[in-house]
Image (cartoon, coloured by chain):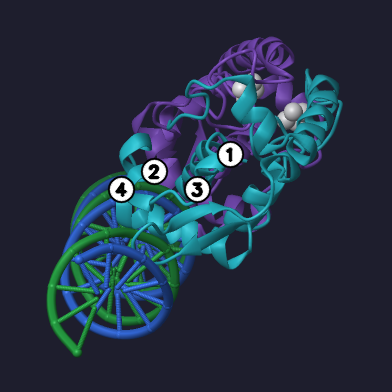
Chain colours: A cyan, B purple, C blue, D green
DNA sequence: ATATATTAAGATAAAGTAGTCTTTAATCTT
DNA sequence: AAGATTAAAGACTACTTTATCTTAATATAT
């Protein structure tokens, strides 16, 4: 279940862009400075988002990247699906199928319910909502 | 949060040994066959458990490994701590600190509660209980 | 003693992830 | 047209995890 750094970086950058959608193109250099992420590595990540048409990029002076759609129309599921292959919330709360059955697990039902909520949130939470809820940093590195 | 394969293999082998404690030493070859784990890799994992005095080993014919203490006296926390460095249940249900604060997360409180249950279970569930609850395979590979 | 069984230990390989560096392509400014 | 700016693309490095292979050490059985 743990997300890769690529995915975290992509999420953080996307939320940043959502909070600045009116600014147009933002350079990757600026994003990498603000989020304290390696510029080159972030470039790779954002290229993938660009190729998936989640971001739009523009070269040259005044260029950079921006969200391709309105932030209220992009769910975090889209970002995750682009950057993480086969992302699924596991059946087991420990992140892997440790116990296969309900009987052996003292909290399996609790987890099953929460898992549903998480899945729903991932599918419906938009970058706009995230950027609005808290303008401060709320997607952080590990 | 996701456990490494080393840790999963160690847990599975330990539960198997808990279910056969009366058999004395069980060869690693037999365990690897039964659990369908690479013999050599499993050997490495069990060596670490042996060095941590969770398992006891014996070389030569009729040798093998067995639990060093009674299964009812070994928690899964011990196995995990031996095989996984710095294992902690993360603050965020997605396995990493995605959102830092309560406000931004639609299920933070649910997760916080479940996290407590999981931590307690990890600290108190014993190999004996696990082996007893279900004699069938209930710790599976991914 | 010798052959066999078995874990221990070490070297190596394979794969994935994270990170860096260099070159190319596109765009703008002058 | 020339030079500067910026993303795109590709090669490369470093690290970790997983897995394999070989040899050594230890114990048993005959
Ligand atoms: S088996 Fe892991 S949550 Fe129930
Ligand atoms: S921030 Fe991830 S569970 Fe609330």
Q: In this view, does D4 lie to the left or right of A109?
A: left
- Name the quarter showing ligand 2: top right
Taking depth in this image into account, of A25 and A31 the one nearest to the observer is A25
Which chain is home to disc 4? A
Tag 4 and tag 1 share a subunit: yes
State yes or no: discs 1 and 2 in contact (Cβ < 8 Å): no
The residue identified by callout 3 is: B62
Label 1 near label 3: C-beta < 8 Å? no
Residue at 58% across, 39% down: A18
Residue occupying image coordinates x 86% and y 25%: A103
Q: Name the residue under label 4.
A: A38
The answer to whether the residue labelled 2 contacts the one labelled 4, judged by CB atoms less than 8 Å apart, is no
Q: Distance between the residues labelled 3 and 1?
A: 65 Å
At numbered mark 4, what does the secondary structure look like: helix, strand or loop?
loop
Residue A120 lies in what quarter of the image?
A: top right
Q: Do labels 2 and 3 share a chain?
A: no
Q: Which one is closest to the eye, mark 2 or mark 3?
A: 2
Q: What residue is shown at x 45% (from left), y 45% (from top)?
A: A5
């Amino acid at each position: 279940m743990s997300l890769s750094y690529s995915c975290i970086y992509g999420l953080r950058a996307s939320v940043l862009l959502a909070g600045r959608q009116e600014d147009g193109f933002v350079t990757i250099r600026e994003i990498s400075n603000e989020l304290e992420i390696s510029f080159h590595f972030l470039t790779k990540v954002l290229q993938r988002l660009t190729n998936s048409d989640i971001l739009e990029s523009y070269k040259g002076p005044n260029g950079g990247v921006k969200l391709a759609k309105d932030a209220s129309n992009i769910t975090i599921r889209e970002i995750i699906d682009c950057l993480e292959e086969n992302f699924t919330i596991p059946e087991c709360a420990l992140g892997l199928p440790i116990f296969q059955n309900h009987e052996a697990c003292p909290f399996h039902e609790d987890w099953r319910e929460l898992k549903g909520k998480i899945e729903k949130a991932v599918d419906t939470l938009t970058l706009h909502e995230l950027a609005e809820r808290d303008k401060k940093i709320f997607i952080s590195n590990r």
